Amino acid sequence: MTDQKQDNQIKDEVKDYYGKTLQKSQDLKTNACCTAIAYPDHIKKIMGKIHDEVMSKYYGCGLTIPHQLEDLTVLDLGSGSGRDCYIVSALVGNKGKVIGVDMTDEQLAVANTHRDFHAKQFAHDQSNVTFLKGDIEKLNELDLPDNSVDVVISNCVINLATDKEAVLKEVYRLLKPGGEMYFSDVYSDRKIPANLVKDPVLYGECLSGALYWNDFLNLSKKVGFLDPRLVESAPITIQNKDVEMKVGKIKFYSATYRLFKLENLEPDCEDYGQAVVYKGTLPSSPNFFRLDEHHIIPEGNVFKVCGNTFKMLQDTRFAKHFDFIGDESQHFGIFEGCGKSLPFTDNPEEDEFSSKGSCC
């Protein structure tokens, strides 16, 4: 079987799995595509207004809703029944726009059915959400211009793509300078053997299509996202004896990353003696701003940062929420704390900010 034929077969199997085999989130055989999430209060309030049918067909492994979305254009890759799109639609408001892309007819039908319902729920003049049928590896085939999107989100979907590089390349093309991709997905602690990749159930359950974490980091940098930042992670326990036997010693993690489209980032974290002060002006997070797992910035404190972190805050939509101290006129060497090892935690309870809660 040629690689292209195999890829097409995998896509057809994924469509059937999410369009016909799965009718609700409880039909999943593992917890990989529906991990425990602790939702912040402002998201919980919005979720309470989402239509029951949309909620029942949600499959996700993380919280893919970043801060500061008002008036922005947001693209959701693999939008499914539309749950995350509708949450974001409430946050971007009347002047914002949300675009969902999915390849499964059954999921798109559910999402489109409830556009007017959610417009009324969120007191919008008209629906600010559009759903497009498409392959997230071929976003160039949709009418989406270069540099037209502020934020791209995705919830446990990119692992289902057969060409991850194509997805990331298209995201980079679509993002405006300073824009970001904020997404959750499943990763493995080693490369997945070919025989497991061909298993339709393991693939549909978001396991055998998972990227080895170091391959993901290198791939992100290759397409232009020079400094991927891990926001949070948690081990996937699978909770299915048959599946556990198949995957053997491979460990899987759900993880949320943010990738910024910033051309002037450096390969490593460099120390220029810079610092930032968070003003506490984000209503949904007044006490601290969490850029990633290593940068939880308390309100009002002078917080030392590397050059890349400085740019991620100064050259993006977050700039108005910070005061900035220093420039790059003097270099002090590598910023302490940089290293390359398995980034994920096996014990999320050790992290006071890690995800906890009940599935879906």
Image (cartoon, grey):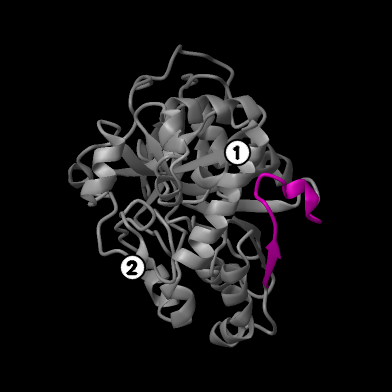
- Viewer-closest of 139 and 269: 139
Residue 309 at least partly seen? yes
Q: As rendered, which of 100 and 335 lies closer to the eye?
A: 100
Q: Which residue has dot 1 on it?
A: 6
Residue on which the image places disc 2: 26
The N terminus is located in which quarter? Answer: top right
Expressed as whole percent of the image width and height from the top left, the position of residue 300 reads: 37, 48
Q: Residue at x 57, y 76 (%)?
A: 110
Q: Is residue 162 above or below residue 112?
A: above
Instruction: Please identify the quarter of the rendering in which residue 63 is found.
Output: bottom left
Q: Is residue 160 magenta?
A: no
Residue at (59, 74) in percent of width and height = 111
Residue 337 on image: x %, y %: 34, 22
With 353 as the anchor, is 145 left or right in this view?
Answer: right
The reply to whether residue 237 is visible in this rendering is no
Q: Earlier in the sequence, mark 2 or mark 1?
A: 1
Q: Magenta segment, which residues?
A: 129-144
Q: Secondary structure at mark 1?
A: helix
Q: Residues within 10 Å of mark 2 (few under 14, many from 20)?
A: some
Q: Position of residue 137 (x, y in %)?
A: 66, 44
Q: Is residue 220 left or right of residue 284?
A: right
Q: Nearer the viewer, mark 2 or mark 1?
A: 1
* Residue 259 locus on image (x, y percent): 55, 39
Are the residues flagged by discs 2 and 1 in contact, CB closer than 8 Å?
no
